[in-house]
Image (spheres, rainbow, N blue to C red):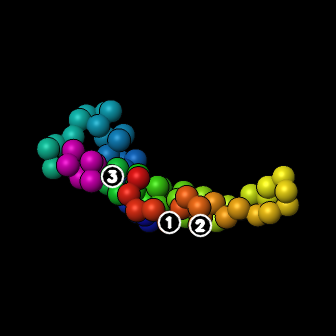
Amino acid sequence: MDKKSIARINELYHKSKEEGLTEAELKEQQILRKEYVDSFKRSLRGQLNNISIREADGSITDLGEKFGNKTGN
């Protein structure tokens, strides 16, 4: 998600509080918010897939291999 899209989300939010949005703007806001949430989830999943834990016995468990690399939520 680029800065331009995030700025547009914020612009639509402020406009909705001040004067309200048209139907087209409401639809655009919903689409942009969904894209933002999806982008956030992909980023978080990518970070979580790169976590390794050192177990008490000294072995290392790669959580990305164990739980990650799943599609969906």
From this viewpoint, is residue 47 visible?
Answer: no
Tell me the residue at 40%/62% (across/down). 71
Q: Which mark is residue 34?
A: 3
Bin the neighbour count of mark 2 within 10 Å (Cα to Cα): few under 14, some 14-19, many 20 and up: few
Pointer 1: what residue? 69
Tell me the residue at 59%/66% (across/down). 65
Is residue 17 shown in magenta?
A: no
Check contact, mark 3 vs mark 1: CB within 8 A. Answer: no
Numbered range of the magenta stretch: 26-31
* Amino acid type of the residue that numbered disc 3 sits on in the rendered structure: Lys
Tell me the residue at 85%/56% (across/down). 57
Q: Which tag is nearer the camera, tag 3 or tag 2?
A: 2
Q: Is residue 5 left or right of residue 50?
A: left
Pointer 2: what residue? 65
**Residue 34 x %, y %:** 33, 52
Tell me the residue at 53%/61% (across/down). 68
Q: Main secondary structure of the magenta part?
A: helix
From this viewpoint, is residue 64 visible?
Answer: yes
Q: Which mark is residue 28?
A: none
Q: Is residue 10 left or right of residue 57?
A: left
Check contact, mark 1 vs mark 2: CB within 8 A. Answer: yes
Label 1 residue SS:
loop
**Quadrant of residue 51 in the image?**
bottom right
Q: Which tag is nearer the camera, tag 3 or tag 1?
A: 1
**Residue 12 x %, y %:** 32, 46
**Residue 42 x %, y %:** 47, 61
Q: Is residue 19 left or right of residue 41?
A: left
Task: Give how far apart the Cα atoms at labels 1 and 2 are.
Answer: 7 Å
